[in-house]
Amino acid sequence: MKLRLLVVVVCCLFLAACGKATKDEVIEDVNKKWNDAKGYELSASMEVRTGAEPRVYDVKVWHTKPDFYRVAVNPKGESEQQLIVRNEEGVFVVTPSLRKTHKFQSEWPKQNSQAYIIGALAEDLVADSKAVMTEDDASYTFEVATRNVDQTALPVQQIVVDKKTMLPTKVSVMDESLQEQVVITFADIKLGVQHTAEEYAVEKFSEKEEKKAASAEVVDTEFSVYYPTIDWAHTKLTDEFEVQEDGNTRVILTFEGEKPFTLMQQPIQSDETILPVSGDPADLGYTIGAITDNSIQWDKDGMTFFIASTKLTKDELLEVAASVQESSIK
């Protein structure tokens, strides 16, 4: 009797062990499911906590194999929208309400973590041999390195995967202290959905706004100056002046010290349909800009902003840009 009971216990333990998936097995299953689909649509909520106050955005993503992407981002409860589009002609950032389209010479989203693109998340899991997996009854949770070489301030992410669907439910991108800075909560993911190449044409996303405002001209009016609110002890505003050029007003702020930079701002001029820009798309939380090794530019609130510096890293350029806001404090 004792021997029989021992055999039963051993068999139960063996079956339990066999039924428990290893980290590598889960990653293999996830990678296969997320990347084998010919296309997908998803919707998510993105909370950005890098500023003084948390900001929440609605995110909708299309992907059709092999390389077509459309990411629409707009502030929660607002109609203003920006899109990142990758089609057969390249990578574009479209701001329909401003009638502006920027074209990038970029491989986005390859070689970078993108918390709302599930294929990129799967590649993050495969790329990090030191990824750690924990689990409970409902979910697998992975702690894995990001691949954002330009955003080393956010080196870690947690990816939560539902055991029943094997789809992500939440991604938290964290700083070095493991404090959540960006949180993506997935609301709906539909695998197998495909869109035609014509549906990724950038004209599709801006033509309605173009028709509304085709005859509108940008009128230069008095505007409030925006300042970075970042507090760097040994970098201070040393000069501020206004330039008039072709009837347009441009304000230039000079900051000097250990981390010097120049911030330029002016009302948006929408005199071209597609504007070529250098660099890669840069997510500032509240908008999408363009970043190079020495500069970053973006549009917001009817204004164009440009920061240049030979001393700041890309992390620091992003940090300054994310802090810029309308203020009377200099």
Image: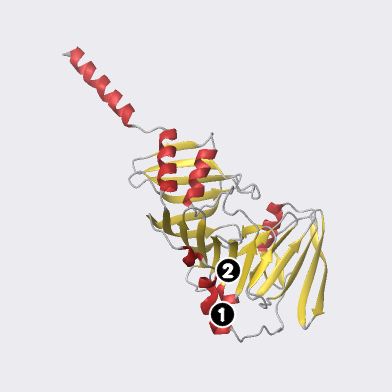
Q: Is residue 59 visible?
A: no
Q: Quadrant of the C terminus?
A: bottom right
Residue that appears at 79% across and 70% down: 252
Q: Amino acid at mark 2?
A: Val
> Where residue 88 sits: x, y (%)?
55, 60
**Residue topped by disc 1:** 210
Look at label 1 and name its amino acid: Glu
Element under label 1? helix
**Residue 248 appears in which quarter of the rendering?**
bottom right
Q: Which image quadrant for residue 262? A: bottom right
What is the x, y in percent for residue 92?
A: 59, 64
The circle drawn on residue 279 is none
- How packed is label 2: few (under 14 Cα within 10 Å), some, or many (20 or more)? many
Among numbered discs 1 and 2, the one appearing first in the sequence: 2
Per the image, the residue denoted by label 2 is 94
**Regarding mark 2 in the picture, which secondary structure is present there?**
strand
Which of the pair 198/318 is nearer the observer? 198
Q: Which residue sits at x=66%, y=77%?
A: 270
Q: Position of residue 67 (x, y in %)?
A: 52, 54
Query: Horizontally, is 12 left or right of 154 in the view?
Result: left
Residue farthest to the left, as pictured: 1
The foreground one among 80 and 110 is 110
